Image (cartoon, rainbow, N blue to C red):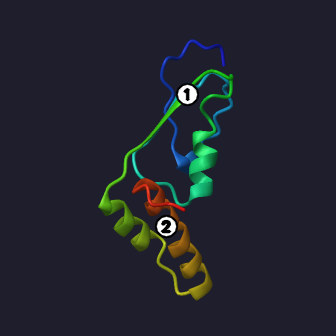
Amino acid sequence: MSAQLKVLVATVAFGMGINKKDVGYALHYSIPNSINNYYQECGRAGRDGRDAECVLYYSYADKHKHEKLKNTENLVIKANNSTNLSKMIAYCEDTFT
């Protein structure tokens, strides 16, 4: 909190509980679970009103990883997961409407 750090690393596994106002850069190594998650995670940068940058790395392997991790017998949850993943991929491929 004293602004002595130049780099702060967080993972979604720890909830990205970053409560710093001077974060200027957010980097995603793979796609988040949904557009909403992406929005929340990107919102960690730029809280101080200054320009911030967010970079999202995406590969086709991300889709398969998410499908495997989110596999469930519950058809409602499965459909929701699929919809969220499809929207996230559309965003990455600049086809999101």
- Tell me which residue sits at (44%, 62%) in the image: 89
Mark 1 vs mark 2, CA separation in Å:
25 Å
Q: Is residue 66 visible?
A: yes
Label 1: how many residues lie within 10 Å, few (<14), some (14-19) or many (20+)? some
Depth order, front residue of 9/40: 40
**Residue 52's mark?**
1
- Tell me which residue sits at (58%, 25%) in the image: 23
Mark 1 or 2 closer to N-term?
1
Q: Is residue 15 visible?
A: no
Q: Position of residue 54 (x, y in %)?
A: 49, 36
- Tell me which residue sits at (61%, 14%) in the image: 3
| Residue 58 in the figure: left or right of residue 51 | left
Label 2 element class = helix
Q: Position of residue 60 (x, y in %)?
A: 31, 61
Q: Quadrant of the C terminus?
A: bottom right
Residue 50 appears in which quarter of the rendering? top right
* Circles 1 and 2 in contact, beta carbons < 8 Å: no
Label 2: how many residues lie within 10 Å, few (<14), some (14-19) or many (20+)? many
Depth order, front residue of 21/54: 54
Label 1 element class = loop
Q: Position of residue 16 (x, y in %)?
A: 60, 42
Give above or below for 43 relative to 50.
below
Residue 74 appears in which quarter of the rendering? bottom right
Give above or below for 81 relative to 16.
below
> What's the residue type where badge 1 is placed?
Ala
| Residue 33 in the figure: left or right of residue 58 | right
**Residue 85's mark?**
2
- Tell me which residue sits at (53%, 87%) in the image: 73
> What's the residue type where badge 2 is placed?
Leu
Q: Position of residue 88 (x, y in %)?
A: 49, 60
Give above or below for 16 relative to 91.
above
